[in-house]
Structures are given as structure tokens and as C-alpha cells.
Image: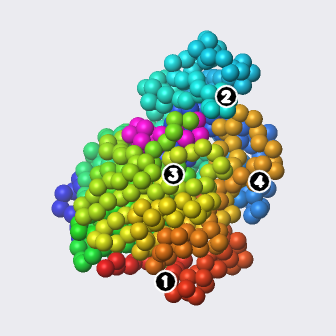
Amino acid sequence: MELHMSDDLCLRRNIQLEPLVDLWYAWSHLISPATAARNVSERHIKIMKSYISAPTVHANAVANEQMRGGPFIDYAGKRVDEIHELLDRTVEKRRSLLELSKALADLNSTLQDKCQGYALADCYNLVPPALKGYVELVYDLNNAPSYRLIESLLYRSQYHSTETQTMMLSQISKDERPFILSTPRLPGQGMVHLNMPFHDDAIDYLFSAKTNPRSFTSMIDNCDVSERDCDTFRSFFTTETGGTCSSYDGKGARWRYFGHACILLEYKGVSILFDPILSYTYEASPSRYTYDDLPGRLDYVIITHNHQDHLLLETLLQLRHKTETVVVPRSNGSLQDPSLRLALQSMGFRSVIELDELQELEITGGAIVGIPFFGEHADLDVRSKLAYLVRIDGKQLMFAADSCNLETQMYRHVQRCFGDIDVLFVGMECDGAPLSWLYGPLLSRPLERQFDQARRLNGSNCDQAVEIIEALKCKEVYVYAMGQEPWLGYITSLKYTGESHPIVQSNRLLDYCREHGIAAERLYGEREVLVC
Ligand SMILES: [Fe+2]
């Protein structure tokens, strides 16, 4: 249908938004000041220096399947000058963040060297100036010295700058995207680079234009598009009206699988979206639900844990205009466990609720309950992870994400508290990355290889998942969060074959369920189920 207002246009449904920090693909650890400091100094700068000194080594590593997802820049050994410029600019612009990174390392070694069990009051004068007032020193019950960060103050300090947050817009028409976490996103043809912090309302105006026509002049002004980029920016819009939002108004509840751990649950006009990670809309196989298939309003967006494939800023920012409340697990204030609430609030999400283990959030006709999520974080003390039990209409659905069943007794306790589970969603990515892949920049010294390889981001294997199912007396089981869909490679870097361990393990689980009369599937692509 043609629109009447000549200035009103719709954003095309295949416009991709890449949020960037210092031109690196943004994820939550680049938002929280302390983790950002460590990632800039210990990941970005190191990778860029390595590329500048040996670009062909990077090109060869990227071409090697075995090294997928490793710390290598994917520019075929080219664009070295641009990476050099970015490195110089990062060192210049991020001076205070680099001081913070050094202060965190210094504080840690000072505590280990100087705090031997006496009162810590005398140690505050040893805290590096860059961190003074931002940490409380503590001992654990074994007399090991440590500290907790006052993150809320760090967000209101010179260490939290949105100046280097930008957005890259481009058109996407196929699933293949290069792995994004190891390569800074340099501007190129067909891209429009907007100097816009993530909290900017212009993002809401822009992405609501996928379904509601908006004034193009306002969008040019709001997004501060440069003269040079105007034509490309205009090509992102169309006079055709965009997709319509669909919502479920039938009997009972309906869930739809959008890929990975992204599930939309709807009932009685309430919509709950778990771990949003969505395909853009273009012709591709397998068929899938996309942004077009979301309702006009998301009552709850629920995050299970702080890994990039579950808390994906690219998707969250595009949904912000229709998101009422985000529910996140509460963190513990340590360096490795930054607050998801503070990160999301700094990105313009106004209503963010933190949930604890067994804490209930009342919702229309039921409740969402936080359930303990063990493992999958390389044995680090990370609390910002929850499975969720959704209790609606006499049904109990549990979304366990990447929970690794390290102790079945915990699930027996959960069953005792809440009863049998009707529907379980369980991840089985049981060959997770080693600790250093995600948390390496936060360590005070590199981990020995054998420890790094042993401590991984593993989900449950078959035996562990079977024990969850038995303990919770599940009636229906869906294996999900496998990172299998072809539109996820840019963030998961996974490519399975029939022999891949997670596939073999989940096949075994499906066999087990079949033999025991439990309905079970491994989700892939798209799926819709009515819960009556
Ligand atoms: Fe995970």
C-alpha cells in the first residue's frame, strides 16, 4: 500500500543495526565500566596490536575452521592502517578507562601482597587513586582479601562515557555474517555509521518505523546523518508500509520458538519474550519467525544470563520501543559479575526488574519465578544467571537456558517447592568455550592451559539433562539454545555436524524421552505450540 504523507517512510525490514563501542561489536561487558576497562586493555588493544604486527597470521587463523571464534581480526590481512588508526584513537580516547584497568590489576596484587588478615581499614590508603571510593575491601571467610565494586558510582564517573558508542546500519539479505566479536567493525560501502549513544531515543523512533511510518526528515535530524551518508540512509527506507504486529488472542497460551533460546510466550494478551535474538526479515531457508512476528508490545523481556547469545544488545535495542519491562537476574557486584540492571538502564531501558533465586514476580494470571542456574560460567562466582519458571493457567513451564546440572539434588528441591514441570526448555551446548574466551581479560594473571581447558562454559550433557527431567518429573521437553540456526553464526561461531558432541548428546536425550513416554524435540528454525 502506498502512503499518502510524502515525508513518512518505513524502515525496511532487513535493516541491520550493529551497536558498537570503540567500533567493536557491543556486548554487556563493554557497557559496565570495570569490565569495559579490562576488555579494552586486555582484549581490544592486544588483538589490534597483534594484527598490526602479523596480519597474515590472523588471515590464516580466520580461514582455519578449528580456530573459529578465536581472537583474530577478519580483514584478510588488509586494512592494517585503519586498525592502526583505531588503536591510536582508542589509546587516546580511552585514557581514563585504561587507568581504571591498570588500577584494578594493581589493587588486586596489592591486596594479595599486603593484606594478610589484619583489619582492612589500614589498606584503603593502598587503593590506587583511580579506584578510591569505588571499592569496599573485604575478606572472605578464609581470610582471602578481595573487594567489591560500587558499580552504580562507576556509572556516574568519568569511566562511563557514551562518547564512543555508535551504531552501524546496513542492509542484510542472507544469513551469513562474519563472526563479530573479534573484529572491529570498520565503516564500508552500504553502511551508515551514526554517532549515537545507545540510550538515544532516536533508536526507538527509527525502529518503530519498521511497522509505523515516520517522518523521514525527523529521522535524518534525530540520527544526525551526515550529508555524505544521506543517499545510503534514504535507501534504507521504503514508501511501502512495514510488517504488521501479530499477537495471540486464542485460548490458553501459545509459545513460538524464534531460534536459539528466544521464545515468545503469549496468553491472555500478555507477551513474554525470553533471550531475544532474532533473524531479520529476508528470503532464506529454513523458514523462521523474525522481528515481524512479534506483537506490538512486549510486556516482559526476560534475560537468563549474561552471555552474548542470550543478552544481545543488537536485538534488545531494536525492541526497546515496544518493551515494557526487562527482567534480569541479580548480580553480586564483583568484576566478573557486573549488574545487568545498571547496564540496561544506562542503555535507556526504563523499567528493569532484578530477580533472585526463588523470588516471584507476579504477572497477570500467574507468576515468573527465578530458579537457580548452576554452572556454565567456568566455576566463577557469577550470580547473574537464572532459569525461570512460568506458572500460568495451572501450567508450569521452565526455561533453563544453559543451566548445567552439576547437582541433581537442587532440582529435587525445586520440585518439592513448586511441583512437577509440564514443559521444560533445556540447552545442551555441552562443548562450551574455555574460561578465557569470555572472562580472560578479567583475570589477574593468565590461567594455565590445562585449567583453562578444564573450566568451560558447558551446558548439560545427556545424563545431566535426564536427571533434571527425572527430578522435575517433566512431561514435555524441548532442547533449545543450541546456536544451530544459520543466522546465529556471527555471534556463536558454531557449526555442527551429526557427530558434534552436543548433537550426539541431545539425540541420546531424545531417545531417552521417547523410551520413557515423554514428548521431546530439539528445536530448530521455527516452532509453534499451543499450551492448553
Ligand atoms: Fe551461556
* Residue hosting label 2: 143
Q: Residue 417: percent from the left, percent from the top?
A: 42, 61
* Residue hosting label 1: 519
Amino acid type at circle 3 is Lys
Q: Which of 528 and 488 is in front in this view?
A: 528
Label 4 close to label 3 by CB (< 8 Å): no
Q: Which of 468 and 28 is in front in this view?
A: 468
Q: Nearer the viewer, residue 32 or 206?
A: 32
Residue 92 visible within the image: no
Q: Is tag 3's residue or tag 1's residue first in the polypeptide sequence?
A: 3
Q: How far is mark 4 from mark 3, CA to CA?
A: 22 Å
Amino acid type at circle 1 is Ala
Give SS at disc 4.
helix
Mark in the foreground, 1 or 4: 1
Q: How far is mark 3 from mark 1, CA to CA?
A: 27 Å
Q: Which quadrant holds residue 367?
A: bottom left
Note whether 137 is above or below 319 in the view shown. Answer: above
Q: How crowded is mark 1: few (under 14 residues within 10 Å), some or many (20 or more)?
A: some
Identity of the residue drawn at 43% across and 72% down:
420
Q: Give the range drawn in magenta.
A: 335-347
Label 1 close to label 4 by CB (< 8 Å): no
Q: Does the magenta stretch include residue 340?
A: yes
